[in-house]
Structures are given as structure tokens and as C-alpha cells.
Amino acid sequence: MPILETVKIIVSKQLGRDPSEFTAETDLAEAGYESLDVIETVFAVEEEFNIDISFNANSPDTLELRTVGDIVSVVEAMLAKQKPA
Amino acid sequence: MTRVAVTGVGAISPVGNNVTDAWRAIVAGENGIGPLDIARGHLVTCPIAAQVRDFRPADHFSLKQLSVLDRTSQFAILSAREALSDSGLDPAATASANTPVIIGTGVGGMNTLDDNFHAIYGEGKPRVHPLSIPKLMTNAPASQISMDLGLHGMTLAIASACASGAHAVGMAFQMIRSGAARIAVCGGTEACITAGTMLGWEALRVLSSDTCRPFAANRSGLVLGEGAATLVLEEWAQAVDRGARIYAEVTGFGANADAADLTSPDPGSTRQAMEIAMKDAGLVASQIDYINAHGTGTNMNDRIESGIICDLFRDAPLPLVSSTKGALGHSLGATGAMEALLTVKALHHQVVPPTANCEQPDETLGLDLVTQTARHVRIRHALSNSFAFGGLNAVLAFSAVD
């Protein structure tokens, strides 16, 4: 399954909605995300893709996870890092 | 209403294992944050914590006692012994006075829990230590203090996460003020720096990996701490009659609940808790000279807390603000009592302790911060803020002895 589809499922589950309501451009806060939703989503994505995402709400250079597409980008980057050169 | 005196203090902390050592280090701007040193620490990514060091339980307890005391109860007893001794009260008098013991704790005996559950799940052992349950129960520290010191008054634990210690002091204050008790032992304790707890906090994504810098532009999150603090509160007239040293007066208590987000403090409610404490003390903003802030060093707390302080004091001179979590980390259920104790010491010595590690104050917060160096100034009245997960707020007001 494409990464976007998997992330859409995770995000929609977090909000109790249908994945078809989400696109890569969906703004998480506008969709109803609060601070703890982001943390739970990062955890779910880490579990799903078996990756570690460096995300700390207090770090000035922390990842900006504003849209569904932002999450997809992070997952793609982490998976690319894991691939043997 | 009966006035309430603080006549005894006791503490064990990452910067000193008694009040004298801890206060000296806090005023000097030292900090107790260091490399994480725990069992199964290799499982944890976060490399630091504010741990109590150079503490040998066998120096203070018999082997028989130690078999029933989790680290959190050991800390509680030690600080309570120091506080009661410091008060100069005759132990027989406190026993006959049916002295209550009210001790805040966030999570209970986590070392006992972690060690014994690791034995089952990690080592495949079929059983745990037979005293695991009475060691880890959240009321164990309060019960153990009552047993150790022979105190027969109402004894219980207060659990309100990071405000537990402040709520405990507030409840004891109300008991004395109402006449329900003449002497009370109150405070907070926590010893939950275990692999399991650290992983739990890591998953919340709020831990700093270098140090705790409350209210600094380069703050990077909170650091877990541990320790205990105990205060002896006493009916004012009795304290005066027996010629006790009165460190400060407890004058107000404001507590409420956000009834909103689980982890983000609500500006309206937290501000209201401060207002309730001031009103309870019969004080107005212009009379407050110092606030010992909750000041966790997270973006969320420091921004919201600064905002409500600026708002509350918009028509009055800004009081001095510092956070002692830069030195002590965040000891959760103990921290409110520890900060109450340090606020009392600040009033007694007329010294505002500095915010350790705050080398680059965040100017955008608009506070009059005490950073780096302690400040010797006149402090008439002070507040100590505690805002807990679960939206539970507790603010204490203290006043200097004339």
C-alpha cells in the first residue's frame, strides 16, 4: 500500500473518521488534531513502519508535522535512510 | 481563623540530602542534573535525570525496615524526620496531638514495581517479593511516616500528579486553619526514575536530552527528578507560645481543575488558581514580591505560565519569578512540596533563589526573571505555582514573619 494511504488510515483512525476524507494537503489542526493526537500519531506511524521519528515538542528544530503530507515525507525520509547504500 | 506557621522543614534532593545542603546549592545556582544511573538504563534513550546521589539507605534504616520501604518511602521518612526534629516539637507532644500526615506522590513505588515486574516478564521468574504490594502502594510514604514517627492523626496520600505536594501542603494548611489539627506533617515524595517510567516520559516527547532551562530562549524540555520535602505546619499561637522558630506563615491556598485538556494547562483556570490563593490570603497583586513558578522548561508550560503572570500583574509591579526545576528537575509528586519549602526558605532568608541553567532568558515571555544568581531583596509575600497533568492546579501563598 502506498505510504500516503497508510498514513491516511492512521490519521483518520485517530479522529474516528473515514480515510477518504483526507488528502496529503489536509491540515491536521484544522481536521481536529490537538497536541496529544500528534504524539499518538507519531507513535502509530513508528510502529507501523518500524522507524524512529525524532520529534520533540520542545526542540526548536523539531519536525513540523502540519499536514498529512508532512507525515508521509518524514516516513519516506526515514525509510530511505534505512535502505542499504 | 487560626493563623498557620511553618516551624519545621526537611528535604532530600538531587542537590543535597538535607535542607541546609540543598538550600545552599540552590542559592548558589548549582544543579543536580547528571548522567542517568539506573537499573536497565540501556533501554532508555534519554541520557540524563536529576537523581538523589550519595544516599545509602542502610545509614538510615535497619534491614528489617528496608524490606518494606520503597525508595519513595525512604525519601519521605528521611525528610519527615528532619522536619519534625527541625521544628523542635517534643515527639511525645506530636503523638498525643493526633498529628495528621498528608503526603503527595505522583505514582507510588515505581522502583518496586519496575524491579518486580521485570523479574516476571524479563527474567521469567514465577513470583515477586511478598511485600511488593505494601511497598508500592501510593499511601505507603504517608503510612510509613506515621509509623516511623508515631503520629496518629488522619494520614493519607494526595495524588494529583505534579501538584500532589502542593495540594498536600494546602490541605494540611486548611486543617490547621479550621482548627481540625494543631500540628500537621505534610509534603511530597517521588522516586520513579526507572527504565519503564523514563520510556513513558520519552514517549510523551517532552524530555530534554541535555539539561533543564526553565524560561530560557533555548529551553529544551523537562528533566525528571526525584526526592522528598516535608513541612511541619503549626497553629500560630502554639508556635509563638513555645518559642518556636517560625520560618514563614502559610496564608493562602488556591486549587481548581481545568476540566479541559489532559496535558496542556488552561490559562483561565491556572490564572484563577493564583487569584484564589491571593484572595484566600487577603492579598492583592501589588503585595506579591516573588513567584516560585511551576517552570518545567517545556515550551507549553513556560509560555502559558508567563502569560498568566503578565496578565495577573498587568496593573501591579511584576514580581520576581524563578523556577527551581533548573536545579532539581521535575520530581512530579514531590515538586510542589519542595517548591513550597524553597519559597518558605526564600521568605525566611529574604533571598530569591535563581533559575539554574537559564543563561539566555526568553525576553519574549515578559517576566522579571531571576537567573544565574540569587537576589537579596525584600520579599513580603510569595506564591508557589503547581499545574499538573490532568488539569489540576494548586497555588500556595506564603508570607514573611514580621
Image (tube, rainbow, N blue to C red):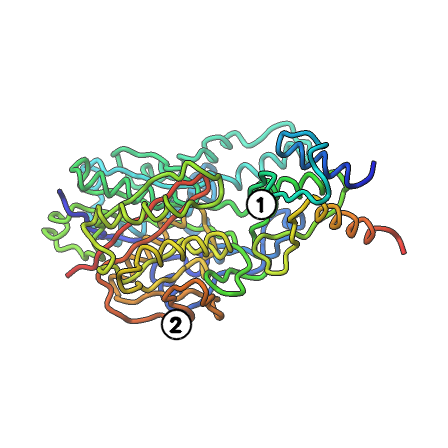
Q: Quadrant of residue B64?
A: top left
The one of B157 and B354 positioned closer to us in this rendering:
B354
Q: Please check whether the numbered discs 1 and 2 fall on a single chain.
A: yes
Task: Residue B20: give x, y in percent of width and height.
Answer: 34, 62
Task: Residue B127: give x, y in percent of width and height.
Answer: 60, 28
Q: Residue furthest top?
A: B126
Query: Alpha-carbon neighbours of circle 1 within 10 Å: few (<14), some, or many (≥20)?
Result: some
Task: Residue B285: give x, y in percent of width and height.
Answer: 25, 57
Task: Residue A57: give x, y in percent of width and height.
Answer: 58, 52
Query: Alpha-carbon neighbours of circle 2 within 10 Å: few (<14), some, or many (≥20)?
Result: some
Q: Residue at position x 45%, y 36% from top?
A: B68
Q: Are marks 1 and 2 in contact (CB under 8 Å)?
A: no
The one of B91 and B385 positioned closer to us in this rendering:
B385
The quarter of the rendered structure image containing the C terminus of chain B is bottom left
The tag earlier along the polypeptide, 1 or 2, is 1
The quarter of the rendered structure image containing the N terminus of chain B is top left
Q: Which residue is mark 1?
A: B204
Q: Is residue B355 left or right of residue B217?
A: left
Q: Is residue B113 left or right of residue B146?
A: right
Q: Residue at position x 30%, y 63% from top?
A: B319
The one of B131 and B59 positioned closer to us in this rendering:
B131
Residue B373, disc: 2
Q: Secondary structure at mark 2?
A: loop
B48 up-or-down from B193: above or below: below
> Disc 1 residue type?
Leu
B59 up-or-down from B21: above or below: above
Residue B297, disc: none
Task: Pinpoint the chain carrying mark 2.
Answer: B
Q: Residue furthest right?
A: A85
Q: Is residue B230 left or right of residue B41?
A: left
> Disc 2 residue type?
Thr
